[in-house]
Every structure is written in structure tokens, then in C-alpha cells.
Image: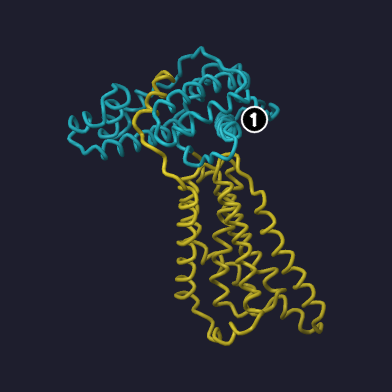
Amino acid sequence: MRTEDLVELLSTEMGPVKKNTPPLLVSGALLVALAGAFVLMLTVFGMRPDLASAIKTPIFWEKLAFPLSLSVGALLATSRLGRPGGTIGVGWAFLILPVLCVWIAGIVVVSGAAPADRALALLGHSWRSCPFNILLLSIPGFIAIFYAMTKLAPTHLRWAGAASGMLAGTVATVAYCFHCPEMSPAFWSIWYVLGMVLVSAIGALLGRRLLRW
Amino acid sequence: MYSEEARLKALFVSSLDGDAVSYRLFLSDLTRYLRGYLRKRIPKMREDIEDLIQETLLAVHHARHTYRPEEPLTAWIHAIARYKLMDFFRARARRDSLNDPIDDHQEIFSSPDDEPQDARRDIRTLLDYLPDKQRLSILHVKLQGMSIAETATLLGLSESAVKVNVHRGIKALAARMREAP
């Protein structure tokens, strides 16, 4: 076929393009991710029994703020990478600063603890399962966000996959905070980060295959 | 070059509001620029250039909802053209071509080229793989220039069904193009 024919084909009577499709797609996927992670958390793990008293402590909110602020960074990164030529840009600030804060808090906690308590602060009671629990909770969001990404036009596929995975992982971690009883920043700084990075790495690996267009 | 950006952007933005005439003008101008751009990048693969132009046009068409008028059109188009070019390199695994220096996005509107070459792929052949409704909708509306209403009566479909079939058909064509180079 001649290219002129293709031009003709593409330009006939297709009507106006809907405005704001990309933000709507991403926010729709975000809602699915949140709902999916919470439903899975409630059915598989259950709410932590002492939630009512936990929410009265500042540390609970500090813990929740960690994945929440990371999810802002991942959301920025995902929306930006969904457009041709898009890069993570300012998203980096929201992805790096929270991790730095939690790492510093973790170091402070561990160095201030008695030597006998250090292992507990670092490993808690659930270090073995924590990253995989986050991975499990991220599955619905992972699918929804990747689906939204295929409706967009990423040109850096590996980064786009990593950002989508990171968004799914951070949202899953927000939900997981309502189950997980670990209250040491040193614990979050390793195992929460590991869980979210795991989902992001899977996204990066699948990006090129699933997001090609 | 800068006035070209402004002119093409004006055409493209009004096409986003549904102006088919602007869109046709935009796409045919873009075709010339893409041809010039690609002939500089892959001069030795002349027979692939026209295929790649068509793939890039389809990609621009499918990505057009991601364009924001506040960003420069050159950068947006260049990202797509480069993506398609890299995808082409990857598909052919021609590693040596990847060593070409990454070019500046301003270059994309710098040298139009008017002489088309025949594409190796024939879209009409690809059309045969589509389901009847999609194939016939595209044939009548797009290639034979019938109106949506006429096609709808002819095929016994509603007008919106014809539009949907055309839209899905073009999507499926793009997917076929990718899979069967």
C-alpha cells in the first residue's frame, strides 16, 4: 500500500480525540490497585487486631507515610513515562527522599538499641515473608497498571515497566501497613523496600515484552 | 524550522479536535519529514524506509491522545519516530546500526523528502487477516471513500459499529505490521 493511502485511511472521519484519557486511565488503574490490595490484604492476612490503638500512635502514620509518598513518586513516574519521550524527572525526588528518611531513621533506631535488641529491630518477626506478602498484594494493581500503560505510549519500555511495578508495589505496601505489626523503621527500610523493589524489578523485566506497541 | 513546528502543531492540535482536513495535511507533511529523517538514518535500507514510515504514522495515530499542546510537537514526534527506529533495529538485530549517534529532535522537521518508495508490505494483503466486519469497514470507508452512513447500510451495521470496526481494524493492522515484518 502506498503511504498516501495510509494517510487517507487514518484521517477519514475519526472524530475528535477524547481529552484527558491518560490521567483517567492511570487513575482508574490506581483505584483497582488500591481496592485489589486492600481486599487481598483483608482476605489473606486480615487487619491487624490492635489497629484501633495503633492508629493513635504517630509511628503508625509515619509508617503509612513511607509507601504513600513513594506511591506519589511512582504515580508521577508512571504518568510521565506513559507519554512518548517521557522520563521519571521530578518523580525521582519522591522516590529517593522517603527511602533516605527511613534509612536514616533505621540507622538511628539500630544504633540506639541495645546490642541484644538490634536483630529484632532489623528482622522483626516477619522478615522472611514480608517482601513476598507485598508482592502478592501488588498482583491486581500490577495487572491493572500494566493494562493502562499498554493504552498509553511509553517509549522507554523498561523504565515504564519498572515505574508501573513500583506503583503497584507501593500501593500494595500501603494496604499491607494495615496488617503488618512491625513498627521499626529499620525493618521497613530493608523489607518494605525490598518488597517494592521486587515488584518494580519484575515490571522492568516484563516491560519490554508487555508494553511494546 | 521553528515556523514548521508552529504550523504542524497548529494542524495537529486542530486535528485532535476532530478536523480531518488538518489531520490529512499534517500526516502528509509528517510523511515527507519522516522520509527525510529515515533516509538519513538508514540510507542503506531503502526498502525498509517506507514500511517504517507507515509504522511510525500508525504509531503517531495511536499515541495522539498522549500529546499535550503545552509540549513541543517536535520532541513528541521525535520520541515516537526514534522508538520505532530502535524497535526496527532491535527486530533486525543489526547491532552496528545502533552505534549511530543519537540525533537531536530539532532535526526531525529539517529535511522533507517527497519521493516515496514502494513499501514492501502491502496493507491490502494484511487486511485479509482481519475479521470481515473490520476488513469491509476499512475497505469501504477508508480505501473506497464511502461515507460511514453508506457503509453502515451496505454492511447492515449501525454507524457507530462501523466506526468501531474501522478503529479496531486499524489497531489490528498495526499489531500485524509489528508481528510480520
* Quarter location, residue A5: top left
Image coordinates for residue B3, horizontal then vertical, percent: 60, 24
Question: Mark 1, chain letter?
Answer: B
Image coordinates for residue A68, horizontal then vertical, percent: 60, 66
- Amino acid type assigned to the residue bearing label 1 in the image: His
Residue pushed farthest top?
B115
Question: Which quarter of the rendered picture does the N terminus of chain B lie within?
Answer: top right
Going 42% across and 37% down the picture, which residue do you hit?
Answer: B17
Image coordinates for residue A194, horizontal then vertical, percent: 65, 64
Residue corresponding to mark 1: B105
A92 with respect to B47 (left or right): right
Residue density around tag 1, few if under 14, some if 14–19, many if 20 or more, within 10 Å: some
**Chain identifier for the yellow-coloured part of the image:** A
Chain B color in figure: cyan
B136 with respect to B70 (left or right): left
B141 with respect to B28 (left or right): left
Going 31% across and 39% down the picture, which residue do you hit?
Answer: B164
Going 49% across and 14% down the picture, which residue do you hit?
Answer: B116
Q: Is residue A89 above or below residue B61?
A: below
The colour mode here is by chain
Q: Is residue B78 above or below residue A129?
A: above
Q: Is residue B110 above or below residue A56?
A: above
* Quarter location, residue B74: top right
